[in-house]
Image (tube, coloured by chain):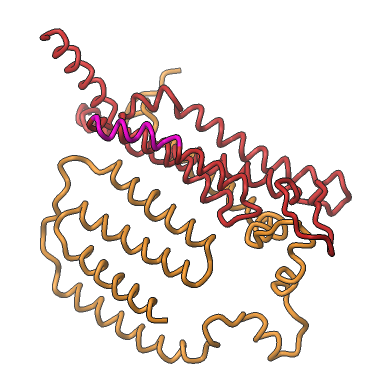
Chain colours: A red, B orange
Amino acid sequence: MEQKQRNSNVAQKEKISNGVKGMTIIVKTIGSWAKVLIFLFGIYIVLFGHLTPGGGFAGGVMIASAYVLLMLAFGGEFVKQNLSPSLALKLACAGTLAFAAIAVAGFFYGPDGFFWNFIGQEWLAGESSNLHFINAGIIMLAELAVGVIVAAAIFLVIFTFSTFKFDVSDNQKE
Amino acid sequence: MAIFYILLLFILIAAVIAVETNDLLSSVICVGAIGFSGSLMFLFMQAPDIAITQIVVEVLGLIILIRATISRDLTFISGDREFFGVVVSVVILFAIFLAGQTVLRTLPDFGTPAFVAAAQNCDLPAPAAQTYIAEGMQKTGAANLVSAVILDFRAYDTLGEATVLFTSIIGATVILRKDSRRLGEEINE
C-alpha cells in the first residue's frame, strides 16, 4: 500500500516536471474515447474538402485538437512519446514540400503551367451529376498537403507554448 | 433578420462581461462565446466554410491555447484603470463612429457583389468572380466552390499562406527550444 503511494507520488512529480499535468480519471477515460472520433472527423473534413464545406485548414486544426485533448488529459510527457515535436516538424516540412512539388509539377505541361490541374477531372457538361470521390484533379492532393501542414503547425504551437519554462535562475547567475 | 440582432446583443453582453470580470478564465470563456456567436452569424448568412473555420480557430485554437499556457498563480487581474486613458479612448471611438456613419451610407446594399456593381458603373465586362461562379464546377470538377477557388484558380495565394504559416511555426519552435543558450553564455568551439 505504501509502495504504491510512493510510486504514484514519483509518477506525479514526473508528470508535473514537463509543464502540463494530467487530469482526473474521468477526463482520461472520456478523452481516450473522444480522441478517436475527433481524429476521424478531422480526416473526413480534409479528404472531402472538394465536395463538402471545410477544406484543409479547418480539418487540420481538428486533427491537431485531438492531440491537444490528449495533452490536456494525460500530460505533456505522454504526448511526447506519441508525437514528439521533432516528428511534427518533419511532418510540417514534408507537407510544404509536397505542396510546392504539386505546384512545380505543372511545369511539365507547358511554359505557363504553374499549378496546372494535370489530373483529369470527370465532370462533363450534360451528364447526371454523380460526384465521385476522385473527380477534382489536384485539389484533393493539395488539400491533403495543407491538412498535414496545418495539423503539425497548430499542434507544435500549442505543445511548445505549454511545455516551455522560462528559466529566471540562469540570468541571475551573472 | 431578427436573429442577427439577438446574436449582436449576445456578443455585446459577452464582451462587457469579458472586460469587466476579474477572473482571467471567465474572461477567456467569454471571448470564446463571442467567437461562437460569430460562427452562428456566418451560418445564418449561408457560409458554412467560414463558420467551420471560425469555430475551429477561435474556440479550439485560441481558447485552448490560452488555457494550456496559463500558469496556476495568475488567475486574478488586479489594479485599477486610468481615468484619462478611458476618456481618450471613448472620445476617439466616438469620432471614428461619427465618421463611419457617413462612409457606410455610400456602400451598396448588404449582399450585392461589389465588383459587379463597380464594373457596371464604368461599363466594363463582368469581372473574374462571375466567371468563377458560372464555370467553376465545369472547369475544376469540384462541388465546393470555395475549395475550387482557393486551391485551383487562386492556388498561388494558398501557397503563400502555407509558407507563411510554416515559417512562423519554425521560428517559434526554434526560439522556444529546451536547450537554448542563456544570456551571457560563452560559445564553445
Depicted B146 relative to depicted A148: above or below = below
Q: Quadrant of residue B136?
A: bottom right
Depicted B133 relative to depicted A6: above or below = below
Depicted B19 relative to depicted A61: above or below = below
Q: Quadrant of residue B70?
A: top left
Q: Percent x, y for residue A51?
A: 65, 54
Q: Residue furthest front?
A: A128
Residue drawn at (45%, 41%) of the image: A38
Q: Which residues are magenta?
A: A25-36
Residue drawn at (55%, 80%) of the image: B111
Q: Is residue A13 left or right of residue B172?
A: left
Majority secondary structure of the magenta segment?
A: helix
Q: Is residue B128 left or right of residue A41?
A: right
Depicted A86 relative to depicted B161: above or below = above
Residue drawn at (62%, 80%) of the image: B113
Q: Percent x, y for residue B42?
A: 47, 68
Q: Is residue B89 left or right of residue B21?
A: right
Q: Is residue A171 magenta?
A: no
Q: Percent x, y for residue A9?
A: 17, 17
Residue drawn at (84%, 59%) of the image: A124
> In the rendered view of the protein, which quadrant contains the N terminus of chain B?
bottom left
Q: Quadrant of residue B128?
A: bottom right
